[in-house]
Image (cartoon, helix red, strand yellow):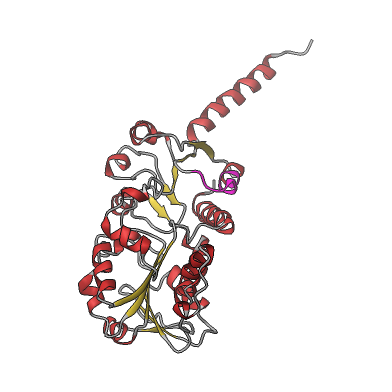
Amino acid sequence: MISKQPLRAKKLGKILFDINFAGMTEKRKVLFVDVPNPYLEDQLTAHGFECKMGPELSYEAIKEEIHEYFGLVVRSRIAIDRGLLEKAGRLKFIARVGAGMESIDVECARSLGIECIASPEGNEDAVAEHTLGMLLSLSNNLVKAHGEMQRNIWSRESNRGFEIKGKTIGIIGYGHMGKAFAKRLAGFDVRVLAYDKYKSGYGDQWAEAADLTSLFRETDIFSIHVPLTRETSGMIDSHFIGQFRKPIYLINTARGKIVNTRDLVEQMQQKKVLGAALDVLEYEDRSFENFKLSALPEPFQYLVKAPNVVLTPHVAGWTHESKFKLAKVLADKILAAFAP
């Protein structure tokens, strides 16, 4: 008769190995505070991460369980502040679906060894195309003329536009979005000047690197592509606009709080700003979703009625293609840094 003792010992050894292996292997749980394209979850799951969807979770609920997670995927719904981060003992990364990091205390995260990952490459093309579209809408009175046609008004002379050929377009912020917009301007026979406080040697085939003095002196059309920070909040005010030598057209597809709306309206009334195209507004909350247009203050009411203004609801980076690309960029970055 064959002894069963070696078989039992073998099974016991396997059990002990499994227990030890499980103890040595940290579960890489990722909480999706906001839900991007499914591609991101699919890729992380395929590489051994355990993903949990939590778009309904409150700040307090996240705070209670954040200690369990290896990674967070966020957009802008919840502020990832020091109060959360100090509870996140296992957290290794925060992945932002988009470019702006203003809802994350990046400095605190980095001090705790947490990597902050953005994905501006995912919607730079969408933002660039939308910015160009807003510029062409302004220069050709497209929105105004369309509205008049809907009201059975046929008015040609009042809708005479202007050509952007020969104009100087000033870009502030020459990162992913600024450069992508500059590329779209190739072929329009315009001069593009770019100013970026935090870069050097960034002039290229799409734009000339310029200082602020040159930007103020030469610009006809001014496009904003800086992130929202303590430094840039309210930066575009009457003092800033007043430094332009010529009247300008202003485009903002970055963040609403960069522009002081009351000052913008004042400069429009004084003809220092000839027209404005705004995809973002100062009055947006953190999530960019909760918005009652009728309750907004007087400066907005001026903008929404002005014939030389184009407004869109924070959709410059919001295309079907960018939704997928944002997820793919994050998946590639997370897996390159943290794949088991």
| Residue 112 rendering spot, x and y as whole percentages | 31, 48
The image shows residue 118, relative to residue 210, as above or below, that is: above
In which image quadrant can residue 313 be found?
bottom left
Using the rendered image of the protein, determine whether residue 113 is visible from the camera's viewpoint.
no
Magenta residues span 35-43
Residue 111 in picture, x, y percent from top left: 29, 51
The residue lying furthest to the right in this view is 1
Q: Which residue is situated farthest in the left direction here?
A: 239
Residue at far top of view: 1
Residue at the location (35% across, 49% down)? 294
Task: Please name whichever residue, 147 or 333, is drawn nearer the observer in this view of the structure.
Answer: 147
Residue under the image location 36 percent in, 51 percent down: 293
- Residue 40 in magenta stretch: yes
Side of 170 relative to 269 (left or right)? right
Which of 324/133 is in front?
A: 133
Q: Position of residue 308 (x, y in %)?
A: 39, 71
Say which of 297 and 113 sits in front. Answer: 297
Is residue 87 visible in the rendered image? The answer is yes
Count of marks overlaid on the render: 0
**Is 136 situated above or below 85?**
below
- Which quarter of the picture shows residue 320? bottom right
> Would you say residue 178 sits in the magenta stretch?
no
Percent across and percent down for residue 95 are 44, 50
| Viewport quadrant of the N terminus | top right
Main structural element of the magenta stretch: helix, strand or loop?
helix
- Residue 273: quadrant of the picture: bottom left
| Camera-side residue of 31 and 299 | 299
Residue at horizontal 62 percent and vertical 43 percent from the top: 46
